[in-house]
Image (spheres, rainbow, N blue to C red):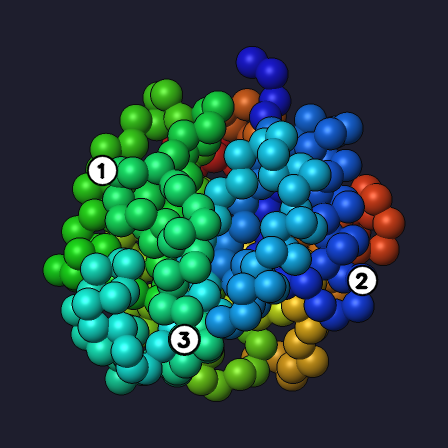
Amino acid sequence: PRPSQFVVYADMGTYSGSAAVTTAAISEAEVTTNNARMVHHIGDISYARGYAVTWEAWFDLISPYSGLAPYMIGIGNHEYDHTSGGAGKDPSGIDTDGSFSPSWGNFGDDGGGECGVPMDRRFTMPSNGNGIFWYEFSFANTHTIMLSSEHDCSEGSDQYVWLEAALKAVDRSVTPWLLVEFHRPMYNNEAYLGDYDVAVGMQAEFEELLVEYKVDLVLAGHYHSYLRSSRIYKDKTDETNGIYHYTIGSAGASLDTATLYPKDWVEYFSEEWGIGRITVANRTHMKWEFMQNTKEDAVVDSAWITNKIYG
């Protein structure tokens, strides 16, 4: 079969000089020239935070390519998180006044009062989960599950129950590749204690479920940097049981300048703007590339991923 290719990134916005503009230009070239057939944007979309004009500016930025290939989005903290005013108005259906607020969380009012409403009204995703918040789709020989890191995913929660059923239903003989995406990463080595605590909390919530169903790759953003890992399980490199966790929050928002926790699973880390490109070669091998935002096709890091079932 013909290889399939798509672009992935998170944390774009419209500011930070020309960074987001460059991301849009590279992505447009990937779609129009290099046969990328889809874009995945995993949260922190426009950074409007209540200012509708910013949404319009961002849509103008992506329109040259978002009209040519499916543009799949995930919810981020800057579209959703709120501390009050959500009861009866939250499009995700939760009935609390504020958004998800676990004891280990640092979930505040990053959405600037949007509570996910502008994003919910502007996008329509597959209607097999909970609107834009969690859903699944197949593309060529790849099945992708989009989750919300801004909602409860502990055992017994609505999202967890849906996720378990979705994972169980994937037919790997039809879609051998299984990707899971959510905005806040389950693993990252930047030394931001509040976000690190969230990652540990997410590991406790549903890492075992992802491992059980042999997920090939987890993609996330939130940290404004790029990270490629080895396979990870229980915060250690584990090539037998683990999953690759890549952070690609480098699409345009201001870059991080953090110190780093020492982790044995870090393969490549960069505080530079850029996007990810995935080429699914066949049922056994997928190629990952990080394209830095300096010029078109500036691949500075790449790796081959072997399939957990057929590799």
| Residue 121 image point, x, y percent | 40, 52
**Quarter location, residue 63:** top right
- Tell me how far mark 2 sits from mark 1, CA to CA: 43 Å
Q: Which residue is mark 3?
A: 113
Tell me the residue at 26%/44% (across/down): 129
* Dot label at residue 135: none
| Residue 28 image point, x, y percent | 73, 39
- Tell me how far mark 3 sits from mark 2, CA to CA: 27 Å
Q: Amino acid at mark 3?
A: Gly
The relative height of residue 271 versus residue 107 in the rendered view (above or below) is above
Choose between 275 and 17: the one closer to the eye: 17
Q: Is residue 248 visible?
A: no
Choose between 64 and 283: the one closer to the eye: 64
At numbered mark 1, what does the secondary structure look like: helix, strand or loop? helix
The outermost residue toward the front is 53
Q: Which residue is mark 2?
A: 18
